[in-house]
Image (cartoon, grey):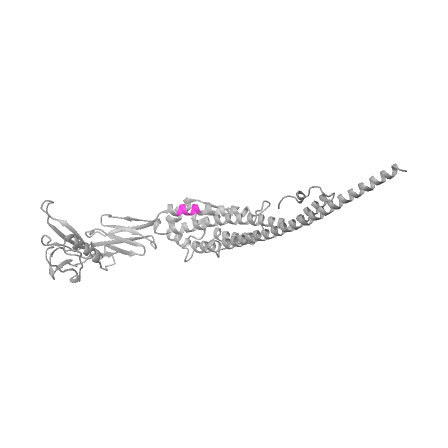
Amino acid sequence: MGTTSSAIFNGNSRYSADFSAVIDRAVAIASIPITQLNNDKTSLTAQSTALQGLDSNFSALQSAVQGIGTALGGASLAAAVSDPTKLSVTLGDGAVEGDYSIDVISAGAYATSMTAAAWNGDGQHTYQISIGGVPQTLTTADNSAAGVAAAINSQYGDQVRATVVNVRTADNPDYRISLRTTKLDDLQPDILDNAGSVQTQQITGVQVHYIVNGSGQDVYSNSRSATVSTGITLNLLASDAGTPVSVTVSRSSSALSNALSTLATAYNTAVDALDQQHGSTSGALAGNSVLNDLSHVLSGIGTYSAPGNAVGTLKDLGLDLDKDGHLTFDSTVLSSANLANSSGVAAFLGSSTTSGFLKVASDGLAAIEQTDTGLLPSFEASVQSQISDNTNRTATLQAFVDQTKLQLQQQMAAADSLIATMEQQYNYLSGMFQAMQASASQYK
């Protein structure tokens, strides 16, 4: 509100102070709803701040749960290979612990060829590329060795790679085109010039040949990448000469240990944040049903169990819930559980999309944190909407109070001016009568 109403009066009337008091009282009465709205806004702002804090806490807990899923994925697995010169291993999503045996009978060979004589691009030429005995059109920018090789790579690079090599010296060059297929097979890569071959076949392509886990099933492939299980790809490098290569895929307990430790920390932080909203020092959200909903989700996470399983409780993983509702983590318990029954640990935790602890925790936290529809985002949006409505209503009422004050000031100023004029007239006439009375008394 603006300055006090008495500022418009200059003491012209003996009633100016009374008029000023009337205006101040009227403005104060009209401002009562504004005071209440400001109090409400203060309360709503405190709720918004508290909700943002809880949102941050539960978002961190959600990330911690997701971290457990990551720790159970391919990133946490490691592969031990008995002979790394024969093969390497690539692990991806879906990979699980296990033992594999691969007999690499042949690592295969890429078919290669080279131009039989120095490349001659003079004259008229119609080029084709032949792969696996099938001639295919080749469009070149020029007839040079570099131009033909570039055309091959541009148009058929997924099937064959062309390189230009000088088989002599820089002073006496002899440029030729070398071809190598991208797949392991007897594909006889060739360049045809006016339908005639210009290449000499060098290496005959051979497919990879291997047997998995002594199955007796011969596998032939035109690629050295062998997917022997979901998320487990072997990159075959050389023949094992009759001695199968063993591969052991196991999970590192450190990744899961770190993830569970992070979960305990995030869980305890969320518990403490909720506790601050209860009790004798209750926060801005005291008595709100959202606290019960949040507590219910936390309880579901902290007390999750899978009865009947060898690994059936969080305590079996080293996570213990104390009397204050906090989780403590003992990494040695997890190491023992992983060593004794790693598959049971993985089964208990499950995944966010199928079953187990991760499914329960992920679903509960999604109900809280889901963008727009989650419990906290929805509540935050509602509070912000109330704050916005409060601000608009306050502005409307303030405008009304300001207008009312201005009207009262104008009315009281007019009344004060009129009374001041009447007072002046009264004083003038009174003075005249007093003078007349004094003069009359002198002539008695």
Q: Quadrant of residue 421?
A: top right
One can see residue 421 in this view: yes
* Closer to the camera in the image, 181 or 320: 181
Q: Is residue 441 left or right of residue 390?
A: right
Residue 6 magenta: no
Point 81% across, 41% down: residue: 432
One can see residue 341 in this view: no
Q: Quadrant of residue 430?
A: top right
The residue at the far bottom in this view is: 134
* Position of 195 relative to 279 (above/below): below
Point out the stretch of residues depicted in magenta.
Answer: 256-262
The location of residue 5, given as percent across then percent down, is 66, 45
* Closer to the camera in the image, 166 or 406: 406
Point 52% across, 50% down: residue: 51
Q: Is residue 370 left or right of residue 159?
A: right
Residue 259 magenta: yes
